[in-house]
Amino acid sequence: MLAEIIFALLIAMAVTGIFAIALKKRGPWGAVWMFFIVIFLVSWAGSVWLITAGPVFFGVSWLSVLILAVIVALVLVVAMPPRTPLSIKEAGEREKQKEKAESVFDLFFWMLVFLLVFAIFAGYWAVPGAY
């Protein structure tokens, strides 16, 4: 279990670093820490649930977890709304829409975190001796 957490943490730091620093993308929330939390939890849940395939290091199949983390990061980046320059009139209307969209993304974030934590606990509960 500790090795899975460490690998999930390392993979999440690497993927978040690549997307946030190199590509200047932070997911639909605009905050790096939220993007990191989602990628970390996805990586951890993936290490619990995915079938061991590929190279194994300290009992963790890291390649499949890395591929899962990159795919989820790409999906989150694609969900980002486009940034286009607007006129002043359109900017006021867009601000109201942006507030509504942010509340939806915040709700999506907390639901996703809850479901991923549940998936992690369910994975350890479903596989006896996994922890």
Image (spheres, rainbow, N blue to C red):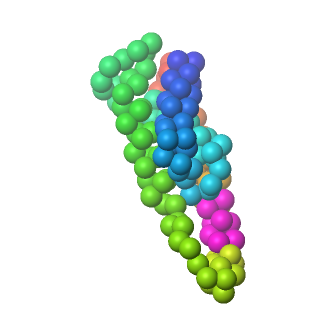
Q: Which residues are magenta?
A: 98-106
Assign the magenta stretch its main secondary structure.
helix
Q: How many marks?
A: 0
Counting from the top left corner in percent of width and height, residue 3 is at 52, 18
**Which quadrant would the N terminus be assigned to in this image?**
top right
Counting from the top left corner in percent of width and height, residue 100 is at 66, 73
Q: Residue reaching furthest top?
A: 58
Residue 100 located within the stretch drawn in magenta: yes
Q: Is residue 64 above or below residue 102?
A: above
Q: Is residue 51 above or below residue 23?
A: above
Residue 39 visible? The answer is no
Q: Nearer the viewer, residue 70 or 109?
A: 70
* Residue 32, picture quadrant: top right
Question: What residue lies at 62% left-to-right and 56% top-to-bottom?
Answer: 29
Question: What residue lies at 36% left-to-right and 31% top-to-bottom?
Answer: 64
Q: Residue reaching furthest bottom?
A: 89
**Which quadrant would the C terminus be assigned to in this image?**
top right
Q: Is residue 8 above or below residue 109?
A: above
* Residue 125, picture quadrant: top right
Residue 98 visible? The answer is yes
Question: What residue lies at 41% left-to-right and 15% top-to-bottom?
Answer: 57
Residue 126 located within the stretch drawn in magenta: no
Q: Nearer the viewer, residue 96 or 125?
A: 96
Question: What residue lies at 45% left-to-right and 35% top-to-bottom?
Answer: 46
Counting from the top left corner in percent of width and height, residue 129 is at 50, 18
